[in-house]
Amino acid sequence: MEGTTLAAKARIDQLVEEINRHNYQYYMLDNPTISDYDFDQLLQELIDLERQYPEYAMPDSPTQRVGGTVTKQFESAAHVYPMLSLGNTYSEEDLTDFDTRVRDLLGTSPEYVCELKYDGVAISLIYENGRLVRAVTRGDGTRGDVVTDNVKTIGTVPLRLTGDFPPFLEARGEIIMPFSSFEALNAERDEIGEQPFANPRNAASGSLKLQNSAEVAKRGLAFKLYYALGENLPENTHYGRLRMLHEWGFRFPDVMERVNGLQGVFDFIHHWDTERNQLPFPIDGIVIKINDFAQQQQVGSTAKSPRWAIAYKFKAERVSTALLGVDYQVGRTGVITPVANLAPVSLAGTVVKRATLNNRDFIREMGICEGDHLWVEKGGEIIPKIVGVDMDKRVAGALPIAFVTECPVCGAALRQNEDEAGIYCPNELHCAPQVKGRLEHFISRKAMNIDSLGEGKIDLLYSQGLVTTVADLYDLTYDRLFGIEKIVGDENGKVRTLSFKEKTTQNILNGLEQSKAVPFERVLYALGIRFVGEVTAKKLARHFKTIDTIANASKEELMEVEDVGERVAESIIDFFNNTENLSVVMRLRNAGLQFEAGETHQPTSDKLAGKSIIVSGVFTIPRDEMKRLIEQHGGKNVSSISKKTSFVLAGEKMGPDKRKKAESLGIPIISEDEFRQMIDE
Ligand code: IVH
């Protein structure tokens, strides 16, 4: 080996060791000892060195966390030990029966371990000589899919064990998606016009099956350990074994309790039935296991599930009530949502009168007929859900619900999105809720930010026939606005008059005037082109620079922009093919709005490069300026906290929820002063 190669190898080893130590501090102990920035520097150095000297890149290198491998099709592998499932119970009587059975078989009352039942995807992790060699999904219990590269990106999965580990170890647990990651993911999907995931479990499962592991790395998944297998493993209790695994580098379960007797089990269940709302990740029940292995063996297993453990699933309360009729709501984007009017019924503390029927496919799949009684359920979620038809109350000859074919607001013939279940009204330029929706979107904070106009005022201007397109806003004059009034009643029947006096009128006009300085990328977003969210608008504006080049771009040219796929490109083309839209754009341009990108401000430093930052609270300068500072130094502003967030920049009066979330994810909270030091201001 030459000198430099030797030195590179030594540095790689040193970096691996150091980064692993920091990962352990961060993911296992929730106690980072260096800043994210310094950590990223180390990681980048290792990535570069491994690229230069691939012969020294170990399969369990911490750079694997970043992902990058692409799997076309997942191989399948046989499980070393079959992956059993658990018997489910829903009542305390069932648990009493379980306990009686166990006591009869043992002749004594055992110590139980109570754990959370994580609501995610089961995974088996195989460690040979301390290295993670394979991660396999449950599959049919005997064979599953090999998803090793994807699982390696999950920070709470150790890639290499530490201490006195055995030559072979199988660790089992659940891969879950914390609520914060789930919300961030769905917000992102919403932005690019993708269907959101229905729940964190589906999101976790979908993420695990992604073909590009670099994408998985961004999903913010976590691993929750609940079981371990191997030959001649030390310790003779379940609790002790998980403690042992903790010694070898796994995170010990956040919640796990040893209890004696059934009462202890019930207490644990009652506590977590309500407290689960406070957890940052989803659970759907509690798992009860006999702690002692000898006793476990004595009790034994069936072919499908162990007799020494049982799952208690939280009950969702449900009632059946009469369907009185179906309303069809037209959303701001034209999508029709059917809503069930129900005979009022009391459920988990509130009276339920209405519940969404989601879309036409939902009604069809449930086979809902006129005059049916429907089952309504309220689980961990706050919103009541329709879960089925109460067939005992089905009237003979009942006809299936016929979905409306015309828009209930404007009468246009409804259409169906090809790739979605959604039925929508295509009359986007003239259907009232859609017109108002566009106006509201246009003035919203992230678009033109005209806060002197709000939903109520837009409603008024629209109902008076003063504004039907966003361009009309800029034709408003003092005389037209002054004195407009409308009598409005609120939900409680109270009546008040809304009228534009001198100050209101002037504020509106000022707001409109100021909006003429709003940069092109936000004007583009404000136009409300279907599927063009804030981020896409920014990318389009930076790529094409002017509205004319965008309007004249071909599908292929549009698709050259990052994040612009076929659907987005087609939507942009449709928008500019419409003469009414073109006329609106022309009028806005004549009014003086920005339709060309100004100077692309190059970051003044890259001190915050690669950082995702959340700004929360009140600062010595307006928050928007704070955000601009972040961008100027190469950082990225994000809106919801996830594991990927580098830090929270906290001003005065930061929201307590955000603080809690940041703390629970171990994300550093940085003050304005500290931030200014970071960027040397
Ligand atoms: S123990 C032989 N513990 O629930 C032991 N399972 O049907 C088997 N699960 O697919 C599992 N949290 O993925 C166990 N604390 C926990 C669990 C848990 C979630 C899942 C597991 C399995 C299903 C049980």
Image (cartoon, grey):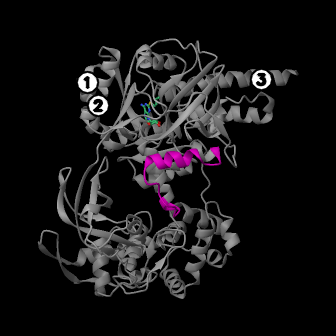
Left-right relation of 128 to 266: right
Task: Give 653 or 420, whichever is nearer the viewer.
Answer: 420
x, y percent for residue 497: 16, 77
Q: Are marks 1 and 3 in contact (CB under 8 Å)?
A: no
Q: Amino acid at mark 3?
A: Lys
Residue lying at 48% horizontally and 72% vertically, measured from the top left: 528
Which label number is shown at residue 9? 3
Residue 354 location, x and y as percent?
Answer: 25, 65
Instruction: Tell me which numbered mark, 1 or 2, is placed earlier along the sequence.
Output: 2
Q: Earlier in the sequence, mark 2 or mark 3?
A: 3
* Ligand 1 within 8 Å of the CB at mark 1: no
In contact (CB < 8 Å): disc 1 and disc 2: yes
Q: Please tell me how many numbered marks the rendered image carries.
A: 3
Locate residue 229: give its quadrant. top right
Work out whether residue 138 can be spotted.
yes
Residue at the disc numbered 1: 262
Please tell me whether residue 269 belongs to the stretch shown in magenta.
no
Amino acid beneath label 2: Leu
Residue 488 falls in image quadrant? bottom left
**Residue mark closest to the camera, 1 vs 3:** 1
Q: Residue at x 33, y 60 (%)?
A: 388
- Residue 368: percent from left, percent from top: 34, 68
